[in-house]
Amino acid sequence: MAYAVLQDMTDRFGSNELTALTDRSGTGTPDATVIGVRLDDASALVDGYATARYQLPLSPVPPSIVGLVCDIARFLLYKDEVSAAVTSAYTNAMRTLRDVASGAFRLEAAGVEDSGSPNRIAAVVPKTGFNPDMMGGW
């Protein structure tokens, strides 16, 4: 499930940029299929980071996720000469996804049930006591 659509990309980046990146047949308009593939790729990436903490697909889709998906998809549409601004937006989006995975950035979406113990390791060992029988002849 894509968390953003062509209109989200157009609203953020404009039709001219999207046309320049995707119009392979010379129609003078953005190629919705090409953009859709990259939106799907970016959404799958979001799912990969969110899966440990949230029920998928994210519903309702948090507005912050729409922006992240658009920034990632835009970066993926570039083949050469990615501008510093596009690269920076992508880098920030990926950093935010790592924060989502770690729990540092919380989404307003249904979460995964908490196991009750916050990242603790427990070991169960038999209780032993020191007694004279353990000396074994010493």
Image (cartoon, helix red, strand yellow):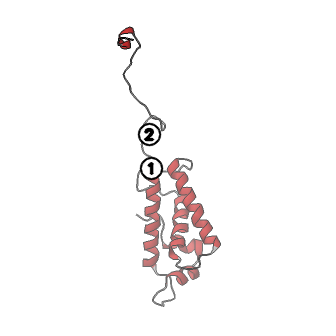
Number of numbered discs overlaid on the protein picture: 2
Which label number is shown at residue 54?
Answer: 1
Q: Tell which residue pokes out farthest to the front in this image.
A: 138
Q: Give residue 38's position: percent from left, percent from top.
A: 46, 72
Q: Quadrant of residue 131?
A: top left
- Dot 2: element: loop
Q: Quadrant of the N terminus?
A: bottom left
In the rendered image of this protein, does residue 39 appear above or below residue 109? below
Which label number is shown at residue 112?
Answer: none
In the rendered image of this protein, does residue 2 appear above or below residue 58? below
Pointers 2 and 1 in contact (C-beta within 8 Å): no
Left or right: residue 9 versus residue 116 is right
Q: Tell which residue pokes out farthest to the top in this image.
A: 132
Three-letter amino acid code at disc 2?
Asp
Query: Residue drawn 64% across and 72% down?
Result: 84
Q: Give residue 83's position: percent from left, percent from top.
A: 62, 75
Q: Give residue 24's position: percent from left, percent from top.
A: 46, 87
Query: Residue drawn 57% across and 80% down?
Result: 17
In the rendered image of this protein, does residue 115 appear above or below residue 4? above
Mark 2: give few (<14), some (14-19) or many (20+) Cα within 10 Å.
few
Q: Which residue is mark 2?
A: 114
Three-letter amino acid code at disc 1?
Tyr
Q: Quadrant of the C terminus?
A: top left
Q: Quadrant of residue 12?
A: bottom right
